[in-house]
Image: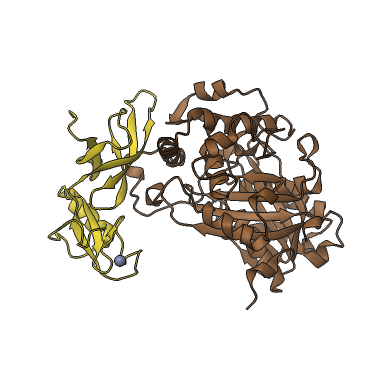
Chain colours: A yellow, B brown
Amino acid sequence: MSAEIPGRAVELCIEDGGPHATYQALLEQHVLAFQACSGCLSAIFPPRLRCPRCGADLLTWRASAGRGAVYSSTVIAPRGQEPYAVVLIDLDEGYRMMSRIDDDAVAIGDRVVVAPARAGSETIPLFAVEGARR
Amino acid sequence: MMHERALRGRTAVVGVAESDLGEVGPGITALDLVEQGAGRALDDAGLSIGDVDAVFSHSAFYGMPTVTLAERMGIRPRYSDSTATGGSSFLAHMRHASAAIEAGLCEVALIAYGSNQRSASGGLISSGQNHLPSYETPFAPRLPVSAYALAAARHMHQFGTTRRHLAEVAVAARRWAQLNPAAFERGELTIDDVLGSRMVSTPLTVRDCCLVTDGGGALVVTSAERARDLRRPPVYYLGGAEAHWHTGISQLDDVTVTAASESGARAFDLAGLRPSDVDVVQLYDAFTINTLLFLEDLGFCAKGEAGDFVSDGALAPGGRLPVNTNGGGLSYCHPGMYGIFTLIESVRQLRGEAGDRQVADARVALAHGNGGMLSSQVTVLLGDASTV
Ligand SMILES: [Zn+2]
């Protein structure tokens, strides 16, 4: 772990609402947000109120650069639809999240980059293999 | 304060039963199956409703499961526990019941489960609705299978485990099921059948996934003193432990190591036993990868070596370690939360009444329950009279 708080500071666009509401509001602006603990410098995801590592009430919102590596991947091929990969991604800032990559050739270890997409009325953080044509 | 080790041998399972299994048809509710299994388990113990003063249950079909069960059966319990850790719940109930009995909070505990998921919906019923925002479902994983598939894919990447190793688990389960008249799937199944069956979520095929059946079961637990006067040979509680680290699979730091590594070590310590002391093993095999992970995490082989450990029919009848001797969730029965069946089969093996699938000289059994997405892990060690 680095000795610095991970990620880039974000200007909060909203002041009310819980951790998820804040995360989603940032995502609507195509900011992939996570939290960092000023107490133990951990990167925390999904959003919450207190650090699950040290218990401190010192979480601040940070912006991820949206880059990471595939930790694991499973391909699903629904009948009549294009196959897609559900992946676990280790973000460079030091946290993990699930996402989807619409490329069934994605492999563990591949470098990936966030590609926010609309899903119904919300934006969700899909990813793509870095350098791949989309 | 007493040490938990003091629970060793202080309580015993004195009655077990399954409800009707498989596909019970329309018009039978989940509660009907709970009542049926519980009634049969009490009959097995030679006890009646009036003897029961504690109820333990969990359900995905109705709220307040112990309250609902007690009303249905006319039980007025003084102790009631609806611990809900998915399919592992019933193993947690076993530990809680043992502690409560030893503390004098109750004397005769009924642990029961039932589900008509196959007849009702044809799909896997999960352990409770979730109205919270999800950081997984927007990406369309097929839950629960994709969570287990992500663990399997990583295990293969990290340790060289193969789909053939996974298939060994399914084939061994089927070979045990062929010896169990109550098993749902008893037809021939080969490694190639598993490898060639429909892919659900890579690397897991439909034959790497548990069945979707109806079914239920129950256990009656009481003090060792009271157990000695009952009609069935007591099966003693030697130790049990619970652990959970995450709910969603994205929150498990290393998806190749589950909290079974913690529950198993603690249960063995409490029971004063080691994996080499175990004669028969019942693992919650919701998916073939479970069996590999739990064999490693519980200490039957080293981390990463389960693929080799299970090869060449090692878990099947006549193999090196009898695992899931009823046929498991893969071939015997899987009504949504399978954990209670790991205990029921352990008891049957330790009583020596498992028929064609009986393991010779079974004295110590390990039952291991899993809940959620490899989330909740509960290990229970049981033994016959020679172990206490
Ligand atoms: Zn912290």
- At 53% across and 53% down in the image, what residue appears? B261
Name the side, left or right, on which B136 lies relative to B94.
left
- At 24% across and 61% down in the image, what residue appears? A36
Residue B330 percent coordinates (x, y): 59, 35
Residue B223 percent coordinates (x, y): 77, 66
Residue A52 percent coordinates (x, y): 35, 64
- Rendered position, B304 above or below A14: above
Locate the N terminus of chain B by quadrant.
bottom right
Residue B31 visible in the current orientation: no
Name the side, left or right, on which B155 lies relative to A92.
right
Along the viewing direction, whichever of B356 and B337 lies nearer the viewer: B356
Residue A31 visible in the current orientation: yes
Along the viewing direction, whichever of B26 and A65 lies nearer the viewer: A65
* Image-quadrant location for residue A2: bottom left
* Image-quadrant location for residue B171: top right
Locate the C terminus of chain B by quadrant.
bottom right
Ligand 1 image position (quadrant): bottom left
Along the viewing direction, whichever of B63 and A49 lies nearer the viewer: A49
- At 63% across and 57% down in the image, what residue appears? B268
Residue B276 percent coordinates (x, y): 67, 49
